[in-house]
Image (cartoon, coloured by chain):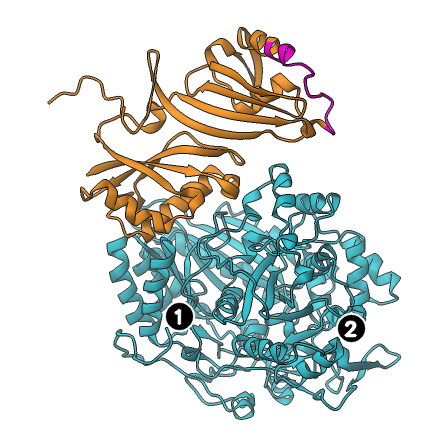
Amino acid sequence: MFRLRICHQKQGRLRFLSHLEMAGALERAVRRAGLPVALRGKYSPHLRLSFGPSLPVGVSSAHEYFDLFLTENLMEAEVLGRLQPELPTELAVLGAAYVPNRAPSLTELIDLAVYEVTVLSTAFISSSSAMPAKRESLRRKIESLVSGEVELARKGKKRQVSLAKAVDYWKLTKSTTSAVELELGLVLGGTDNIRPQEFVDLTFGHPSHPPRIHRKALYAKLEEDFLNPLFYVGVQGLRG
Amino acid sequence: MADNNLWNRIEPILPLVSRPSRYVDHEVNARGKKPEKDMVKVALAYPDLYEVGLPNLGLQILYEIINDRADALCDRAYAPAPDFETQLREHNIPLFSWELTEPLARFDIVGFTLQSELDYTNILNMLDLAGITMRSEARREGEPLVLAGGPLAFNPEPLASFLDAVVLGDAEEVICEIIDLLQQLRSGASRSDVLKALAGIPGVYVPALYKVEYRDTGCVTAVVPLIPEAPAVIEARVIPDLDSVPVPKRPLLPYNRVVHDRAVVEIMRGCTRGCRFCLAGYIYRPVRERDPGTVLEALKVLLRNSGFSEVSLLSLSTADYTALLPLVGAIMEDASKTGVSLSLPSLRPDSFSVDLATQISRVKRTGLTFAVEAGSQRLRNVINKGLTETDFLDTVQTALEAGWRRFKVYFMVGLPTESRDDLEALVELVKAVLDLGGRTSPSEQRRTLRMVINVASFVPKPHTPFQWVAQDSKEVLIGKIAYLKKALKGRREVEFRWHEVEMSLLESLLSRGDRRMGAVLEKAWRQGARFDQWSEHFDFSRWKQAFADEGLEMAFYTSRPREKEEILPWEHLSSGIDREFLWREYQAALSGELTADCRSSSCPKCGLCPAYKVGNRLADKGASLAPTPGKAT
């Protein structure tokens, strides 16, 4: 068996697909491409594909990954060449690399996601909060948030989350009266994590219209380096 | 054409609604055809949610046929979910077509498919959201032609005031004739010229060209054509040979979870079993089977173009398809290599079907479904479902021995001549099945049998032998269901489900309604009626109020037995079947006589074949499975 890691995007109007819907579309494209994929399951076999951390509805992405388990060792370029015509450009495949079978799964490997979040002033029209007036006050607010702990409610349960641990870094890339743009490096997995939507709600006080969220990249963090999952696969001390 | 594109106004509201993938289109195999000068623009609209409407095979067939023409374009529309509707109204966005995101009001034709009476209010709602004038007579020049087709087109009278034209029967040829007509009449033709010309196409009914006269009792006395071009009776269109129409090669692939997520080929149209309650069995005659080689080839192409992992053979009664065994054998052989599974809907409750189901499903977790419909032999004979108790129990035995443990059985209450004895027999039949389950269990499977008993209220349908029948009153139906529920209560293995009786009443009102019901429909819609098939939106009191406001009585339509001589509101629309035949079948029902299946036995003289010069066309039982050269694929 041969494990091929494929990078793809999720753009345009297809950002409104849920994770399951996108996974289904990719699986069908793989079938249409006639690729020799391993089957999993004894009674109702389905194709062996393994996905990375899920992307919520409405969030676009420049780089997402899935692992495809093939029964033949095809050239990466051939697989991409056969898959590309079966996909709409919004879900285009961008690259691929073979990964050792015993490497950690994508969800185990990937622990950092970089997001670009845009909040428009028009998002506050029917909300109780308002667009922050000055760049400096916004910067100070975020600085103070990120240094401490917050209480987040998920699925009815409340949890204390340390933002110092959950937020790897942040940058205020744009701040005008009409729009605020943030770049956020958020930790995935572990005990302390925060979603970009939650971060926006904490910072801006629940604007009525959801912010535009775009996932720029996913990384495996090794000490201070951000490593691309196509090249760093996380296998420590390989034994011969 | 940039003005027409509403996407920039739609996109901002998508994050605010649930399941926005319903509205984004860009599905694989969506044509996204761009409109060019002189193209006839058609929007096919399914009056229910995207998840229900997208897989509909009829619309997919017409979608391909129209888009394959150089001089026409086909786009699609579905009913917006209530939260999306709120946003559309709030932001003044007219209802649009999915691919071009252009207002429906800018299309030449908007065509609805009539699949369920409970969808009717959605049709009105979609017209309103689109900004199309609701009443046909008030529509202005330049507004689209609002058309309808599908099984319920055989009694479209409740919608008559809102529809410009209705297509009866198989639509594959008629839709092309309608587009040809529009191309010819392009410039200078007024709306009324177009309607008059449409009436000249066989199978097309233009309600505005007829006047309905009523007696003071409320019964129809006559349906009178207002101009010579309008025929007194509109005959349905029947395609004699199914192999002459193409199988859709490029199915629309939703991202969303839709109700049927599989590659579907229609293997057969029509059914000759003659179950007396079934509308489809009468309006889709005669039986026309597709050549099995064509089916196999079509499946291969479909799988290649879709990537579905499941395949299904569609028809009204798949187990009757002549070449079924060789076809299934061939499909299973291919399928085992590619991990594709086969599903067969609508099997008969007999051992043949069980053997087949066992062959195709390696896992029997999904369960077997049987439509037994009536509990006693006598009542089954009344509806012409000749199934004997012995046969049914043998079937269940075969299933149990093969390892099946889950069964779903459909029944109806309120069938004509039903008495307490019949209900008791239903309970006894269920118990007999449970007893069998207790006795027959392969030693390694001591799991208990699980049965889902699904009970619906019988609704008399037009164009069937039961079109004259009085439906049981609401109280009686509720009482019958309660009786069954109580009688089956003690058994853990049984899950009892039933359809809401008031929904069945609404279905009954609309299925045998006349034109006066149009006003009721509009009133109910104005009071907020939409998605009546969802219990969270269904509110029968709206309908009761609307009836009262219009001075009409529900019982007149539902529980009044019709006289033989009475002119029924749909008689000017013909399915090709003799009225006399339907009446004879009704009488036969009352005396519990069976009528044989005309596919395998003598002709019961329903009149259709000589009238339309067609006949049953069966596939070759010993067909070899190479595709026949020269046939459409």
- Mark 2, Cα crowd under 10 Å, few <14 / some 14-19 / many 20+, is some
Dot 2: what SS? loop
Residue type at mark 2: give it. Answer: Arg
Q: Which chain is cyan?
A: B
B239 relative position to B185: left or right: left
Report the front residue among B21 and A143: A143
Q: In the image, what residue occupies the spot 23% across and 42% down?
A: A70
Q: Quadrant of residue B247?
A: bottom left
| Pointer 1 residue | B319
Q: Chain of mark 2?
A: B
Q: In the image, what residue occupies the spot 73% across and 81% down?
A: B193
Q: Position of residue B614 (x, y in %)?
A: 49, 88
Residue A130: in magenta span: yes
Mark 1 near mark 2, Cβ–Cβ under 8 Å?
no
- The Cα–Cα distance between marks 1 and 2, rounded to whole angstroms, is 39 Å
User: Most extreme residue toward the left, as rendered?
Assistant: A240
Q: Position of residue B465 (x, y in %)?
A: 62, 79
| Pointer 2 residue | B515
Q: Position of residue B417 (x, y in %)?
A: 65, 73
A225 relative position to A194: left or right: left
Taking A101 as reference, is A70 above or below it?
Answer: below
Q: Which residues are magenta?
A: A125-139
> Nearer the N terminus, badge 1 or badge 2?
1
Residue type at mark 1: give it. Answer: Ala
Q: Quadrant of residue B521?
A: bottom right
Q: Which chain is orange?
A: A
Placement of the N terminus of chain A among the 4 image quadrants: top left
Taking B64 as reference, is A232 above or below it?
Answer: above
Report the front residue among B522 and B502: B522
